[in-house]
Amino acid sequence: MNANKSKQHIFYCVLIFVMLACFVAGMSTYSFVYEDGFYYNKNDVSAYIYKFKRLPDNFVVKDDRGEVPSEDANKYMVGGDEFLNREQLIDNPNNYKMVECDVYSDGYTLLNRGSERLVFFANAERVFYTADHYGSFVLMTEFNINLVSYILFSVMGLIFVVMLICTIAAACIKKRNRIPLEEIVLSIEISAVIIVVFALCVPIALVKIVEVIHDGISDRRREAI
C-alpha cells in the first residue's frame, strides 16, 4: 500500500513539474506587445500591427534610413512604405492601401535587409508574411502568431484534467460500495467537462490579465512624462 502511494505521489509530482514547465514555456513564447516597445521578428511585429493598427516606433520608411544615427542603426528597421501588389499574389478585393515592412533575419541591417517581409492592409485587417521577398505569402492570424503558446497551454490544461480525473476516480473507487456505479461515472463525466473548460480558459485569461496590467503601467508612465 505504501509503495503504491509513493508511486502515486511521484506520478503527481512529475505531472505538476511538466504542467509548470508548459506554463512557463508558453508565457515565454507568447508575443506580448506594448505600444512603446521595439519589435523585430514576424510574430511580434504582426501581433503589434493587429493590436495597435500601426508599425512599432523602431520602423522608418526607406527615404529616412539616412537620418538614423550609425550608432542606433541596429535598433531600427525599414517599414511603412506602400506595397503595390503588382503580381496580385494577395487578394485585395476592396483595394485597401497595403503597407510593407522588414522583419528580422540573420545578418539584417538597414542596408542589407534580407528577404523576409510583412505586408499588411493599412487598416490592419490582415497581415501577410513572405520569406522569399514577395514570391509567396502566408496569412498571419492572431491565432497562429501564438500557436506554440496555445499548444503548450493546452497540454498544461490536459495534464491538469488528467490529475483531477485520477483524483476523482480514486475517491469514487474508495466509496464504490456506497455509491452506484452509474452515479460515479456521471460524476466523473460532469467533473471532466467542467475541468476541461476551466483548465483551457485559465491560462489564456492569465495572459490577458498580464497584458492589461502592463498596458495600464505603460499608460501611467506616458502620462507622467
Image: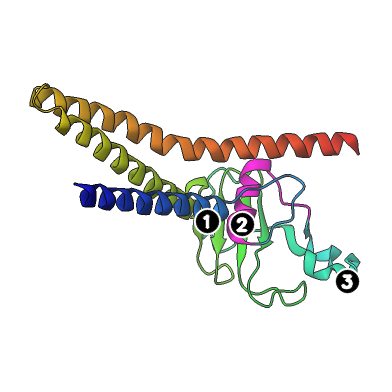
The residue that disc 3 covers is 71
Q: Amino acid at mark 2?
A: Val
Secondary structure of the magenta portion, mostly?
helix
The C terminus - image quarter: top right
Q: Earlier in the sequence, mark 3 or mark 2?
A: 3
Q: Which residue does the numbered mark 1 point to in the structure image?
A: 90
Q: Is residue 220 magenta?
A: no
Figure check: 22 above or below 41:
above
Instruction: Work out whether mark 1 precedes mark 3 in sequence or the reverse, and give the earlier one.
Output: 3
Could you say whether the residue bearing mark 3 is in a helix, strand or loop? helix
Where is residue 19? Give x, y as percent.
41, 49
**Quadrant hosting residue 131:** bottom right
Going 34% across and 46% down the picture, which residue do you hit?
Answer: 159
Cα distance in 3D space between marks 1 and 2? 9 Å
* Of callouts 1 and 2, the N-terminal one: 1
Q: Are marks 1 and 2 in contact (CB under 8 Å)?
A: yes
Would residue 96 be seen by someone viewing this image from the given angle? no
Mark 3 or 2: in front is: 3
Q: Residues within 10 Å of mark 1 (few under 14, many from 20)?
A: some
Q: Are marks 3 and 2 in contact (CB under 8 Å)?
A: no
Residue to which mark 2 is pinned: 119
Which of discs 1 and 2 lies nearer the camera? The answer is 2
Which residue corresponds to the image point at 8% horizontal and 25% vertical from the top-left? Answer: 177
Look at the image and give the residue range highlighted in magenta. Answer: 41-57
Residue 158: image quadrant is top left
